[in-house]
Amino acid sequence: MTFLDEDIYNAVKNYIPKVSEYVNSHGGGIDLLGAKDGTVYIKLTGACGGCSMSLMTTKMVVQKKLRELIHPELVVVNVDGTPENEMPEDAYVGDEQEDEMQKPESNGLFDNIKKIVGM
């Protein structure tokens, strides 16, 4: 892939709200962590973060949709704490301040429950 890490990161950042609809419907969310050499690093959060199906969600939902929207060779890795899914230290991570300000509000089941009970 001949795209800059920054370009891939920004493209994914723009499409995360559209891609995360399925994950949100299951009480989860997607945090974009970084990009390096055609690989995008995400973290599934909420109910999806610890789910036994998180690998399947990453590959069959998130990666599939991002490949359709951005590039067919894009690889998506869920950084889940295992050594094989670590993000490289030199991955492009964007402007953290800007990302926090523009992060869309999650509307997953658990987020709605937290709002109701005041958490």
Image: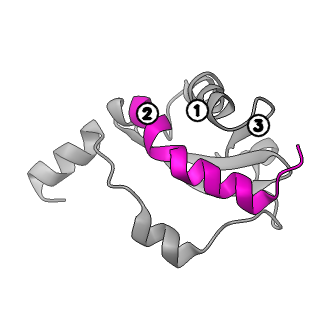
Query: What residue is shown at x 59% (from left), y 29% (from top)?
Result: 65
Residue tagged 1:
62
Can the viewer see residue 81?
no
Q: Nearer the viewer, residue 59 or 70?
A: 70
Spatial separation of the CA atoms under disc 3 and disc 2: 18 Å
Query: What residue is shown at x 69% (from left), y 31% (from top)?
Result: 67
Dots 1, 2 in contact, CB < 8 A: yes
Spatial separation of the CA atoms under disc 3 and disc 1: 10 Å
User: What x and y, as percent, mark residue 22?
Assistant: 42, 29
The quarter of the rendered structure image containing the C terminus is bottom left
The quarter of the rendered structure image containing the N terminus is top right
Dots 3, 1 in contact, CB < 8 A: no
Q: Nearer the viewer, residue 49 or 101?
A: 101
Q: Nearer the viewer, residue 118 or 24?
A: 24
Picture disc at residue 23: 2
Can the viewer see residue 5?
yes
User: What x and y, as percent, mark residue 116?
Assistant: 10, 49
The region drawn magenta spans 1-22
User: What x and y, as percent, mark residue 111?
Assistant: 26, 47
Which amino acid is tagged 2?
Val
Q: Nearer the viewer, residue 91 or 118?
A: 91
Of the two numbered discs 3 and 2 on the same chain, state the one appearing first in sequence: 2
Spatial separation of the CA atoms under disc 1 and disc 2: 9 Å
Q: Secondary structure at mark 1?
A: helix
